[in-house]
Amino acid sequence: MALFDVFKKKKETARFERKQKEKVESKKGPQEEEKKTKDLKEAADFVAPVKKSKPEGYAAKVLIGPHITEKSTDLGKQGTYVFKIKSLANKVMVKQAIKEAYGVRPKKVNISFSPAKTRFIRGKHGTKSGFKKAMVYLKKGDKIEI
């Protein structure tokens, strides 16, 4: 089919020209390649700061994650942070976990439990799971990046 051969020829000529350019560039010399490798090495030496996305170690056993709501973000401006925690965690465990994960010592910790609630959606009954949350109060000047 001669109609499709036209497109095939264009692709082949473009590929041939690309290969010719690569050959010419490789013959230019090793000096340019050294410059490229130096730039790559410099880029590899730079390490961007990494934020902890999830708590590690002991903190991972206690903290589930931050509880982000409109109310909790307003409290965050005042130095109070809200976290979802495991059901067996207590105040002492939460204090240790916050200190390990964020490097800040809490002034006090309050714990509250949100019970499971039944929902009725599209003709089916279901449950919205309950959770335990901790309100962590910090000293003035201390901050946690969430």
Image (cartoon, helix red, strand yellow):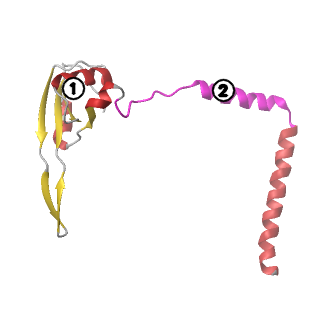
Q: Nearer the viewer, residue 62 or 68?
A: 62
Query: Where's the C terminus, which quadrant?
Result: top left
Magenta span has 22? Answer: no
On the image, which quarter does residue 88 sit in? top left
Residue at 44% in and 29% down: 50
Residue at 81% in and 74% down: 5
Q: Is 16 placed left or right of 145 in the picture?
A: right
Q: Residues within 10 Å of mark 1 (few under 14, many from 20)?
A: many
Q: Is residue 38 above or below residue 114?
A: above
Q: Nearer the viewer, residue 81 or 126?
A: 126
- Which mark sits nearer the N-terminus, 1 or 2? 2
Tag 2: amino acid: Lys
Q: Secondary structure at mark 1?
A: helix
Q: Secondary structure at mark 2?
A: helix
In the image, the segment drawn in magenta is 28-55
Residue tagged 2 = 41
The span from disc 1 to disc 2 (Cα, nearest Å) is: 43 Å
Q: Is residue 20 above or below residue 4?
A: above
Q: Residues within 10 Å of mark 2 (few under 14, many from 20)?
A: few
Residue 145 visible in the picture: no
Coordinates of residue 122 in the picture (x, y in percent):
19, 69
Residue at 38% in and 30% down: 52
Residue 48 visible in the picture: yes
Q: Nearer the viewer, residue 2 or 134?
A: 134
Residue at 79% in and 32% down: 32
Q: Are marks 1 and 2 in contact (CB under 8 Å)?
A: no
Tag 1: amino acid: Val
What mark, if any, has residue 94 been given in the picture? 1
